[in-house]
Image (cartoon, rainbow, N blue to C red):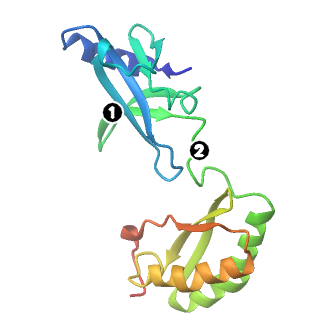
Amino acid sequence: MITFTDQARERVLAFMEMEDGELAVRIEVLDSSPLAPRYDLALIETSEGDDGDRRLDGGGFPLLVDAGSAELLEGATVDWVETLQGSGFKVDNPNIKPIGENAPQGPLADRVKHVIEHQINPSIAGHGGAVALVDVRDEVVYLEMHGGCQGCGMAAVTLAQGIRRILMESLPEIREIVDVTNHEAGANPYY
């Protein structure tokens, strides 16, 4: 069900050695959003687990899996990573695919790209802006703004009154449009 890499297993066992009592690792999916999936891994007393938790062997330690998260965690791998920003456990979960992992495909994605290319980008090009399709899932369109739109103080207005209106009028099957732009990274915003 859930695999711990050698590095993650060693780190768990080292943490357990520092504590007293019969300990287990409990894992739960806090947010399954493709924008920012979040997980909770906690070292707890084995008696503290919830009644519905699945009890598994984590590879030398007890592993308790939240009942509501068990299906979402099927096939997941937990690793220990160390970066310049810090260290910690990282969950690689095949059931929660981050947006933008693959190029958007399918009939709706093709129609969205066409509207962006022929209607939206020409209208915002005068401000040095552009919009790119990142992903389409379940009739939800994920967009990223570039150039003058990235970090622009009017980006939310452009999205709400321009981009959203054009896309939803052109493609009524769209349920929602989500801006996934990192606006703080904008180097040359229009406003």
Q: Residues within 10 Å of mark 1 (few under 14, many from 20)?
A: few
Quarter of the image that includes the N terminus: top right
Q: Looking at the image, which is closer to me, 92 or 185? A: 92
Mark 2 residue element: loop
Q: Is residue 71 above or below residue 161?
A: above
Q: Which residue is mark 2?
A: 97
- Lower position in the chain sequence, tag 1 or tag 2: 1
Per the rendering, the mark at residue 88 is: 1
Q: Position of residue 76 (x, y in %)?
A: 54, 28
Residue at 55% in and 48% down: 98
Q: Position of residue 132 (x, y in %)?
A: 61, 70
Q: Looking at the image, which is closer to me, 147 or 158? A: 158
Residue at 47% in and 45% down: 37
Q: Is residue 126 above or below residue 152?
A: below
Q: Looking at the image, which is closer to me, 100 or 40? A: 40
Horizontal relation, residue 7 to residue 122: left or right: left
Q: Is residue 129 above or below residue 3?
A: below
**How far is mark 1 from mark 2, CA to CA?**
20 Å
Q: Position of residue 14 (x, y in %)?
A: 27, 14
Q: Residue 172 is drawn in which quadrant?
A: bottom right
Mark 1 residue element: strand
Q: Position of residue 2 (x, y in %)?
A: 52, 22
Q: Residue furthest front?
A: 51
Q: Looking at the image, which is closer to me, 83 or 166? A: 166
Per the rendering, the mark at residue 126 is: none
> What type is the residue that disc 1 sits on?
Gly
Quarter of the image that includes the C terminus: bottom left
Residue at 68% in and 61% down: 139
Q: Residue 12 is drawn in which quadrant?
A: top left
Residue at 40% in and 73% down: 186
> What type is the residue that disc 2 sits on?
Lys
